Amino acid sequence: MKKIILIAGLLLVAFDGWAEEEFPIELTCDFTESIIYFNLEKEMKDSWFGINSSLNEIHKKWVFLDKKYLNKQNKFSEQVIKDSAIYLRSAPSVAKIDFRINRLTGSAYIGRDKLLAVGNVGDKLLAGGRKGHCYKGFKEYTEKKF
């Protein structure tokens, strides 16, 4: 009996049977001035991010350059999903924005045009980046907190 349990355990480890990722991964991330929704699929071509229309005017110009990116499904040019972190880069048509999300703590970083290296596991946040936090699911914001 012990041998059967041991063999079953080894098979699970060998085939990584319990670590199957569930898609889509839906997140709401706030970065002080902005609220961004992420819908991450297994294939990058199906993944997207949306920018909440509450974004302030300064951040609209600094990060997203134009209001035309608000309330639409914007694409990625890079997507790396690991056990402990998610690394994303927006498609060049937006503004080459990098996103880093810590899957263990929910903390997140946003930076523009290679301020955050996609796939880099270091914690260095370069000038111009913003810290934030992500929550599971799409969160609705209907009223002011105070």
Image (cartoon, helix red, strand yellow):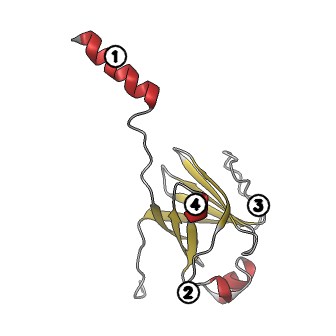
Label 4, label 2: how many angstroms apart (C-alpha)? 20 Å
Distance CA(mark 4)–CA(mark 3): 14 Å
Q: Residues within 10 Å of mark 1 (few under 14, many from 20)?
A: few
Q: Which residue is at 61% across, 63% downward?
A: 45
Is disc 4 placed on a helix, strand or loop?
strand
Query: Relative to 126, is 31 on the left or the right?
Result: left
Residue 51 point in image, percent of width and height: 57, 78
Q: Residue at x 66, y 49 (%)?
A: 123
Seen in the image, is 26 located left or right of residue 100?
left
Label pair 4/3, CB-CB below 8 angstroms? no
Left or right: 58 in relation to 53: right
Question: Badge 2 is on which residue?
Answer: 53
Indicate which disc, 1 or 4, sits on the residue closer to the N terminus. Answer: 1
Q: Secondary structure at mark 2?
A: loop
Q: Nearer the viewer, mark 2 or mark 1?
A: 1
N-terminal of the pair, mark 3 or mark 2, is 2
Q: Quadrant of the C terminus?
A: bottom left
Badge 3 marks a residue whose secondary structure is loop
Say which residue label 1 marks: 7
| Residue labelled with disc 3 | 115
Give the crowd class for mark 4: few <14, some 14-19, many >=20 residues within 10 Å.
Answer: many
Image height of 91 relative to 35, above or below: above
As drawn, the label of residue 108 is 4
